[in-house]
Amino acid sequence: MLLFVGLGNPGAKYVANRHNIGFVAVETIARAHNIAPWRRRFHGVAVEGLVGSERALLLLPGTFMNESGRAVAEAAHFYKLGLSDIVVFHDELDLPPGKLRIKTGGGDAGHNGLRSITSHLGNGYRRVRIGIGHPGDKAMVHNYVLQDFAKDERDWVAALCDIIADNAEMLAKGQDSTFQNKVHLAMSAKGFGEPDEPSNPAD
């Protein structure tokens, strides 16, 4: 059993925020793999099914971002999962919009959702870091992440989440580097930036 966690804030006012791209990615995986219905569980909503040939629980915490760890810890303990079984999808200020990196462990880089999960479980879980860009001034970060994606950003958001979902079985099988490279090649093929050199997911 794997645990795929999308990070975001609950409620209609936050749905299209940059901070909620983790929710969007995991919801897209559920649709693409015909995993339904979502039910209220683990301080949020969850659904269980197959991502390719691998069984996974998909979880969207129902707490606000800074309490995400409560939901993740409860689900992990219920299924007796190790940190390597947990994959967290989240927005990443330090990557350009539409870029993606896989990382295991490390710091939280000021991300309150990651900080909360780490405080409950430790930091050795896997992260799918989805670039949203940086506003350029640290003082602007709070407002920037809680703003909706601009109209001209929505195409790459939809394309990236679809590509993540199409290739999610590789993540489920632990093929993180292959997943990362396929996502970048597919994004480039759709006209969103240049393909990256093959890279190590530990970078």
Image (tube, helix red, strand yellow):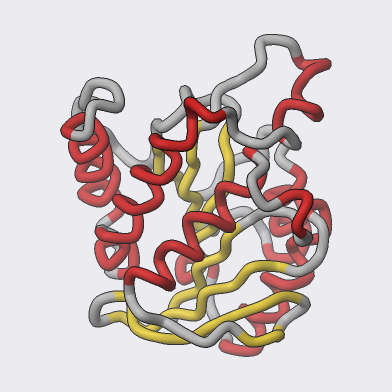
Quarter of the view holding residue 181: top left
Q: Residue at x 80, y 27 (%)?
A: 143
Locate residue 71, reporting x and y percent: 73, 72
Q: Nearer the viewer, residue 131 or 198?
A: 131
Locate residue 55, reporting x and y percent: 37, 84
Q: Is residue 71 left or right of residue 96?
A: right
Q: Is residue 184 above or below residue 168?
A: above
Q: Residue at x 74, y 49 (%)?
A: 14
Q: Is residue 182 above or below residue 156?
A: below
Q: Residue at x 58, y 28 (%)?
A: 150
Q: Is residue 35 above or below residue 84?
A: below
Locate residue 186, reporting x and y percent: 20, 40
Q: Is residue 92 left or right of residue 195?
A: right
Quarter of the view holding residue 59: bottom right
Furthest-front residue in this view: 151
Locate residue 67, reporting x and y percent: 82, 60
